[in-house]
């Protein structure tokens, strides 16, 4: 298996790891956003709570979620290691710093953006995921004809409570702006790494990536704001 | 015109610093290197050590000239080498900062001269095809389509100057390595050794201490020959395919 180690520790193997884990995380964002839209349903949180119950109890989803945690960790550690290695490989920089035409700010700052996203993720997971799993939330919200009449955790109430704070709203909005910049470069970069660079597909990938980088974070950001304004 | 030059001096009495020079009588028809020649004539006549910089053909095809001019490898003109940059770009009183190519794998030898032998070793690792000697083969014995020939030629335009690694914030030489890999991989003559080649060249690239590509695209923007990022994509495909499907080879051992 030395060949596999050689591959995965080569510069191309390492960026393939970044690309594949990144693409998985991109897919996850879509699922997460679709779930979040349940929050906007005016039903006192029934749809959202049923959805979160499903996401935390359906075996296949649970398995995928362990993969998700693993991929977040791999993407983070690999990314930080690459950033450190690349800084070392550059050595001394230039007295005059320039950005060549066509080079985006995001592409030059992926490690910084990624670190900010990690900080956001820690806040975000402590606030909701940590509370849900380890916060001792009672399973006392009962919906008819659901979960054999047993109660589920009222995550909706937790979210509704959190989104009454302007500070939380600000953190979420800033977090999404950072995510947008990360995706602006990351989306199309993942495909280039996989070797997909073709006149027939690349313009679409780049266009779709930019739309994705704006619309998905925008979707995440407006939900807390709508919540704040309507509750 | 009169110019204020800030030039990186390293070696001898200089520890490694930007030194100011005022140069008068610069003609707009001079090339950038001729401007430096004039400066060196002045320094020599004043019994000072001239500025060391590399140059050879001065026709934009050899890849010997380098320099980072006001933060940009080969200066501000698109797809132009330093020797083809002319002083009409500048006006009287301009300040020009001249630094050597920067990358850990390009150590400074003196002033503006860096050691680019790491590129030679990447080529030695696999940037060739093995051809038995004998009579010259018929030129048309192996058919190559026009489009294929053109795309291979576009990659082969790389003059190995090192501007890609100098421009790259990660100090990565993937554009150079990609151009060399794809130049040969696109042609039928290069296919027999393609898998071994890409593995050996990438291994050598990493061994030399070049950084990892993050698809920023600064290399493509600064390349004096306009080498495209799709050469890197091709190298990524070739490398991944070779790593997973080829029977194990001694990666990087030969020529390394």
Image (cartoon, coloured by chain):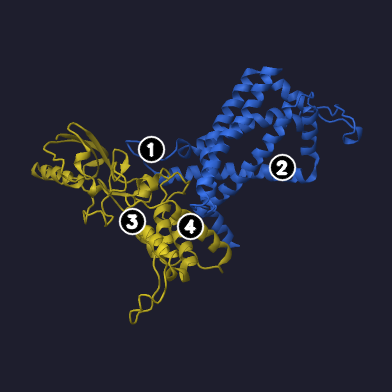
Residue drawn 70% across and 18% down?
A230
Q: Which residue is mark 1?
A: A99
Q: Position of residue B76 (x, y in %)?
A: 29, 41
Which is more N-terminal, label 2 or label 1? 2
Within 10 Å of the Cα at label 4, are there few (<14), some (14-19), or many (20+) other Cα atoms? many
- Give me the chain letter of mark 2: A
Disc 4 or 3, which lies upstream in sequence?
A: 3
**Secondary element at image label 1:** loop
Kindly identify which numbered label has been placed on residue B160: 3
Q: Pointer 4: what residue?
A: B234
- 10 Å neighbourhood of mark 2: few (<14), some, or many (≥20)? some
Residue at point 55%, 30% (across, down): A177
Left or right relative to B32: residue A67: right
Which quadrant is home to the C terminus of chain A? top right
Q: Which residue is mark 2?
A: A65
A160 vs A42, nearest the viewer: A42
Disc nearest the viewer among 4 and 3: 4
**Colour applied to chain A:** blue
How far is disc 3 from disc 1 in space, using C-alphas?
Answer: 22 Å
Q: Is residue B215 above or below residue B128?
A: above
What's the CA distance linking mark 4 and mark 2?
33 Å
Image position, residue B181 (x, y; %): 43, 61
């Amino acid at each position: 298996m030395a060949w596999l180690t050689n591959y995965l520790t080569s510069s191309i193997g390492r960026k393939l790891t970044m690309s594949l884990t990144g693409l998985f995380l991109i897919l996850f964002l879509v699922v997460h956003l679709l779930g979040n839209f349940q929050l906007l349903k005016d039903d006192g949180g029934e749809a959202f709570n049923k959805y979160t119950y499903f996401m935390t109890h359906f075996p296949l989803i649970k398995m995928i979620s362990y993969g998700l945690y693993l991929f977040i960790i791999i993407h983070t550690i690999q990314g930080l290691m690459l950033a450190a290695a690349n800084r070392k490989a550059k050595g001394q920089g230039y007295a005059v710093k320039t950005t060549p035409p066509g080079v985006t700010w995001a592409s030059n700052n992926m490690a910084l953006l990624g670190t900010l996203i990690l900080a956001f993720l820690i806040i975000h997971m402590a606030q909701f995921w940590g509370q849900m799993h380890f916060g001792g939330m009672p399973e006392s919200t009962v919906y008819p004809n659901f979960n054999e009449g047993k109660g589920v955790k009222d995550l909706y109430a937790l979210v509704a409570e959190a989104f009454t704070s302007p500070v939380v709203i600000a953190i979420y909005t800033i977090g999404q702006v950072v995510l947008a910049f990360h995706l602006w470069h990351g989306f199309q970069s993942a495909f280039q790494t996989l070797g997909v660079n073709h006149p027939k597909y690349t313009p679409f990938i780049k266009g779709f990536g930019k739309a994705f980088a704006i619309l998905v974070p925008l979707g995440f950001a407006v939900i807390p704001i709508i919540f704040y304004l309507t509750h | 015109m009169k110019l204020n030059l800030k030039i990186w001096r390293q070696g001898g009495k200089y520890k490694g610093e930007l030194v100011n020079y005022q140069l008068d009588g610069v003609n707009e028809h001079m090339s950038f290197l001729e401007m430096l020649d004039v400066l060196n004539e002045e320094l020599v006549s004043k019994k000072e050590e001239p500025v060391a910089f590399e140059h050879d053909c001065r026709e934009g095809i050899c890849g010997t000239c380098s320099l980072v001019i006001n933060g940009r490898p080969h200066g501000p003109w698109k797809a132009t080498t330093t020797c083809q940059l002319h002083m009409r770009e500048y006006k009287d009183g301009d300040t020009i900062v001249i630094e050597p190519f920067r990358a850990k794998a390009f150590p400074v030898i003196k002033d503006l001269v860096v050691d680019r032998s790491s590129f030679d070793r990447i080529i030695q690792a696999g940037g060739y095809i093995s051809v038995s000697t004998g009579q010259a083969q018929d030129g048309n014995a192996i058919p190559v389509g026009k489009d294929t020939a053109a795309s291979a030629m576009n990659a082969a335009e790389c003059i190995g100057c090192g501007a890609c690694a100098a421009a790259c914030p990660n100090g990565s030489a993937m554009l150079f390595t990609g151009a060399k890999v794809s130049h040969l991989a696109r042609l039928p003559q290069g296919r027999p050794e393609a898998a071994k080649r890409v593995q050996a060249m990438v291994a050598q690239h990493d061994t030399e201490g070049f950084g990892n590509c993050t698809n920023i695209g600064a290399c493509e923007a600064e390349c004096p020959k306009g080498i495209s990022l799709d050469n890197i994509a091709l190298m990524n495909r070739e490398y991944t395919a070779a790593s997973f499907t080829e029977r194990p080879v001694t990666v990087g051992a030969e020529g390394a």
